[in-house]
Amino acid sequence: MPGTSKQLGGNMRLLAFGLLGLALAVAPCPRAVAQEWPNRPVTMVVPFPAGAAVDTLARAVAHALSEDFGKQFIVDNRAGAGGNLGGAAVAKANADGYTWLFGTPAPIALNKLMYKGLAYDSERDFTPVILVAKSPMMITATSGFPAKTLPELIAYARQNPGKVNVGHPGNGTLGHITSALIQQFAGVEMTHVPYRGSAPLITDLLSGQVDVAMDFMPTYLPLVADGKIRPLAVTTSRRVAQLPDVPTVQEAGFRNFEATAWYAIVAPTGTPPDIMSRVNKAVNAFLNSDKGKAILEQNSLQGVGGAPEDLKAFIDGERDKWRPVIEAAKIAMQ
């Protein structure tokens, strides 16, 4: 019955168009979704344990966002694999504005250059939101360690190959890269000891389980002030105001050496632009507020802020800067 078949085909097409129209009618438009956001708690994933500098800053920002938007921003510490566990969790999350990554160079930019079989692609899976802050890195030693300066550390390591234990907050972190780079430049061999963040590293540094730590400076300042650890050098191009007597790595003979830690917020790719814009605006306001400036100063951080495009350009520059270093040092993770 050709006529009947033709009629059925026409009816099916009409039904399909009708269902499509219904779906479009009930589906919320992105702008409407952004205007309703947030209507439930928001998760800010920190890919390192509680107690690290990134965790302290993330909690301050999350508190400010909670006050600003009237919904709780919850910090979720997902440590492990140099920040990759937390990074992967955010990369695979729904791009609906309810999951964000508050991260550091490793999970946001550099792990892609070091890890084989990474569960996510930071360039593809993340959209930059805002560069929150920067901070120096510091090389410290136990109070009883024989070396009191970076040149003395290099000399000691040269005389005792492989016997100096150097702790850092995880494979692929900037502390790890800095350690590898210094060893490469100086032609010495030290033993890498990776940790799952700064807190366990500090515990072992204080107990003498590791001799030296290479990590973000803010977490270690109170220990330096109390005389519990000895600062050997900072990794910025200039000395820092909080430790004016501590020389830079460049002063120790490493020409043009500079490594700066940074903290940024990224979102899963596909997150509505209006939502990202609102978060960017709120974080910029926090950084420029008296309260925000006080928190940054207390933690020896330099607030940055700016537009998402600024963060993207910065991340691209960081990859370009560290790629040849990582390749030359042959840093490769499984």
Image (tube, grey):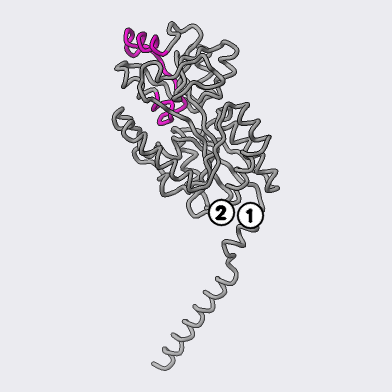
Quarter assignment of residue 289: top right
- The magenta stretch spans residue 175: yes
Picture coordinates of residue 39 (x, y %)? 67, 53
Residue that badge 1 annotates: 37
| Nearest the eye: 270 or 241 | 241
Picture coordinates of residue 24 (x, y %)? 55, 71
Residue that badge 2 annotates: 96
Picture coordinates of residue 157 (x, y %)? 35, 11
Q: Helix or strand or loop: what does disc 2 sit on?
A: loop
Residue range (magenta): 150-178
Query: Disc number at residue 122?
Result: none
Report the residue at 46% width, 16% height from top: 247
Query: Where 297 sits versus 313, above or below?
Result: above
Q: Residues within 10 Å of mark 2 (few under 14, many from 20)?
A: some
Task: Count how many numbered circles sit on residues in the image.
Answer: 2
Q: Helix or strand or loop: what does disc 1 sit on?
A: loop
Residue 161 shown left or right of residue 271 in the figure? left
| Nearest the eye: 72 or 320 | 320
- The magenta stretch spans residue 171: yes
Picture coordinates of residue 68 (x, y %)? 68, 46
Mark 1 residue type: Trp
| Whether residue 1 can be seen here | no
| Nearest the eye: 320 or 211 | 320
Q: Residues within 10 Å of mark 1 (few under 14, many from 20)?
A: some
Quarter assignment of residue 182: top left
Residue 238 shown left or right of residue 276 in the figure? left
Marks 2 and 1, Cα distance to the nearest angstrom? 9 Å
Q: Are marks 2 and 1 in contact (CB under 8 Å)?
A: yes
Residue 328 shown left or right of residue 199 in the figure? left
The C terminus is located in which quarter?
top left
